[in-house]
Image: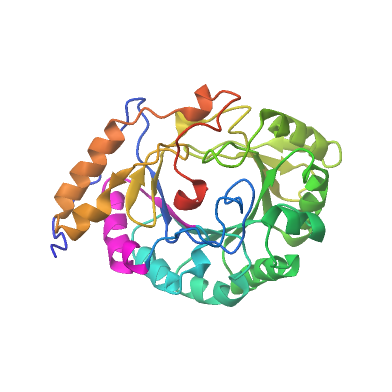
Amino acid sequence: MNTGTLNLIPTAVQDRCGRPLGALRISVTDRCNFRCRYCMPRERYAAGHRFLAGGELLSVSEISRLAGVFVAMGVDRIRITGGEPLLRPDVDGIVAALAGLPLQRLGLSTNGALLGRWAGRLHDVGLNSVNISLDSLDPAVFAAMSASKVPLDAVLGGIAAARAAGIAAVKLNCVVRRGTNDTGILELVELARRDGLTVRFIEYMDVGGSSGWRLDEVVTAQEILERITQVHPAEECAQAPGEVARRYRFLDGGGEFGLITSVSRPFCGGCIRARLSADGRLYTCLFAGAAGLDLRELLRAGAYDEALDRAIAECWQARGDRYSDTRSALTASADRVAMSYIGG
């Protein structure tokens, strides 16, 4: 195999809207131990569902090599996702390989159920950020939303383990769905304030076309902000380029929280993210069509880094995605890649 000895020079690769390529999300598995309605509804991912076989997944060396090409093109932040990435037994090897790249941030998104056993090892090999999905602190609501037998305490233990391991940034992500978990917003805020965490509330999104999403189930960021600030006054912080969450600082010094407004206030104009699926397909939008660009085929055919660079650049330069800017209330029929396939 050609391992690519060319010294690629970082380039300001831009898409048709002038957005640079700056961040990469790498899915390392399409499997998950939860069946959250907004991501992997059980009726679609039942016992007979075919997940990717081992040989279809990118190996650690393939992930590392592709990541190196992206970094040479200007990417400076990488997040490992799934499915649930901690189901992959060599996830520590993936983190270790990526930690050797010149990155501003190397993070991982997880449901937290297995984080108790992984946090220390991942910190030791170079992980410096973890986002943990936590949609409710009510055990019954948590069980209903995760559609799993994993107890809430397992996730809370994972959060504690991440903090104890010394991972620098520990964030909680909550997808807010009206009539399901929206009454628990302040409870999550209190947990975050008490434990020195950052909680981010995400507007319920129509990802993947299989969730049965309805616009009237969206609790807007403005409504969430009003609920929080009625109890804990806060002010908005400056937003860094490429950052998706609008950040707010509590006036009493109790930390920060974030709001991700992909429905009510889309941020497509500043999106700098590419996504790599577990089987090596490149997607340029969370709401992309199902095909993607097959980089695994190029890798396994022996392509040099120069050819990979060219393929990625051409894909990004052709990008005109701005789905959240143009979405309609009716999206279930759209043929889009599943969120579990490319991460959130």
Q: As drawn, is 145 to the left or to the right of 82? A: right
Residue plotted at (24% across, 39% down): 313
Give the vertical position of 170 relative to 290 (above or below). below
Classify residue 140 by image quadrant. bottom right
In the image, residue 74 lies in the stretch drawn in magenta:
yes
Residue plotted at (51% across, 58% down): 83
Classify residue 316 by image quadrant. top left
Residue plotted at (65% across, 69% down): 158
Q: Position of residue 259 (x, y in %)?
A: 65, 39
Q: Position of residue 31 (x, y in %)?
A: 50, 61
Residue plotted at (36% across, 68% down): 54
Q: As drawn, is 146 to the left or to the right of 343? A: right
Count up the numbered dots: 0
Q: As drawn, is 153 to the left or to the right of 125? A: right
Q: Is residue 134 visible from the viewing direction of this image?
A: no
Q: As drawn, is 197 to the left or to the right of 209? A: right
Classify residue 249 by image quadrant. top right
In depth, the one of 255 and 165 nearer the eye is 165
Q: Position of residue 67 (x, y in %)?
A: 32, 56
Q: Position of residue 43 (x, y in %)?
A: 60, 51
Magenta residues?
54-82
| Coloring scheme used | rainbow
In the image, residue 218 lies in the stretch drawn in magenta:
no
